[in-house]
Amino acid sequence: MANQLKKSWFLACALGLAIVSCNSGGNTIETDADNAGLALPDGFGALKVADSIGSARHLVVNAKGDVFVKLQRPVNGEGIIMLSDTDGDGRADEQTGFGDYGGTGIFIKDGYLYASSNSEVFRYELDDNGRVVNPNAPDTVVTGLIDRRQHNSKSITLDDAGNIYVNIGAYSNVCQEKDRTFGSPGMQPCPILDSAGGIWQFRADGMRQSYGDGERYATGLRNVVGLDWNQEAGALFVMQHGRDNLHDFYPDLYDPEVGIDLPSEAMYRLNRGADAGWPYVYYDHHQKKNIVNPEYGGDGKQEGGEDVLDPVVAFPGHIAPNALLFYTGDQFPERYKNGAFIAFHGSWNRAPEQQGYMVAFVPFKDGQPSGDWEVFADGFAGADTVAGPGDARHRPCGLAEGPDGSLYVSDSVNGTIFRIVYAGGK
């Protein structure tokens, strides 16, 4: 009987049945009949791993398939939720939690789970099963990071040389003397850049490090929520949230449609010392150049930032890229290998209709983009027209790769965890 079941499983894989995920361990996972409400490319399916766990931000999956989710706000005193699937059907049937702080960042590397609050980064030792050894006594790796509520999420990633990278978002829209105030000029130089508006590098094994111990690795980044280390390139890539209020504050320079679509949400490849230009310039994907911000004398056309980094990919404005993941698994077709998935949280200021609420894909080759970006997973919002972000049923926020190559997506609205699998022919 066991051999017969195994033959049936391989037959399902060969036929490319969309409702089956063919895992290397031989388990068969049936996707939801409606793919959990998502629109996906042919051959892909989706299921809900869990629902209603809290405002889910970033997530990570250990080698055994347990899912760790960082919550923006603790639920019942627990800010990190661990979801386990004990019967192998792909859905969580066991939930535990720990960590009495909210936040965004979470990452697994070299036997440790790293997680961030809005001002600190903690480290938990993992056992041989990928479970936290002592959830009540983490090491404090980084402390004392600035938190002034605006753009305060401390997203994290690690490289292969023992370094941890932490986003410290700017507590400002565009470094005006009076933030988000019509007519207020930009400060020159921008004092915020001393302690925010960039990526800081610390040692992953250091204890209680702060600004004096770490290094400002890159600057000129208004806010980065999605970041990942690209193994092929050996480099850090980040997704920046662009500024707001171009048309609102400067209607004589920007039409409403332009203000909706600009500035670009941008992907940058960062090297040590890189400057992406905030707050002095923004990137315009139509003109394909950095434009001087009007708070600093720009007119919507004046090019600026001679020494400023250009993005490697530019997306429409205000759709909030909240996660970046380079896919290294073998489950998906070859074209996805080493490519970038981006979770867009969706807009709040693209009236009359909000956009985003999707997962996009950018093909990569040799550590660089090799084609145009495309929508990979859509339908999270649950409606064709979204007037405001509160109308969206789900908002993608985090991405993680499972040990079998599945793609996990977190939702910050209802705390849903989606799992996307592939069962079609390669």
Image (spheres, rainbow, N blue to C red):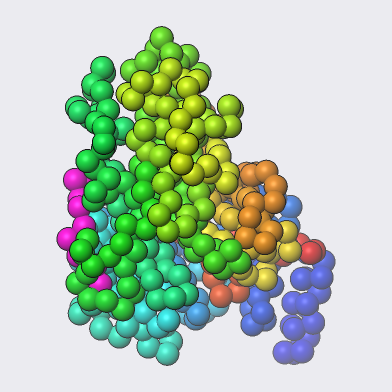
The answer to whether one can see residue 413 in this image is: no
* Residue 201 x/y as whole percent: 34, 64
Residue sitting nearer the eye, 149 or 29: 149
Q: Is residue 235 visible?
A: yes
> Which one is nearer the viewer's eye here, 350 or 189?
189
The image shows residue 235, relative to residue 352, as above or below, that is: below
Q: Position of residue 75 (x, y in %)?
A: 25, 60
**Magenta span main SS:** loop
Q: Which residues are magenta?
A: 141-150
Identity of the residue drawn at 45% across and 70% down? 159
- 401 horizontally vs 129: left or right: right
Quadrant location of the N terminus in the rendered image:
bottom right
In which quadrant is the C terminus drawn?
A: bottom right
In magenta stretch: residue 147? yes
Q: Is residue 220 magenta?
A: no
Image-based side of 19 in relation to 209, left or right: right
* Residue at x-position 49% and y-position 44%: 309
320 over 99 or under it: above or below: above
x then y, percent, for residue 257: 50, 18
Which residue lies at the image location 43% right of the left edge and 87% below the top edge? 129
The quarter of the picture where residue 184 lies is: top left
Q: Position of residue 312 (x, y in %)?
A: 57, 46
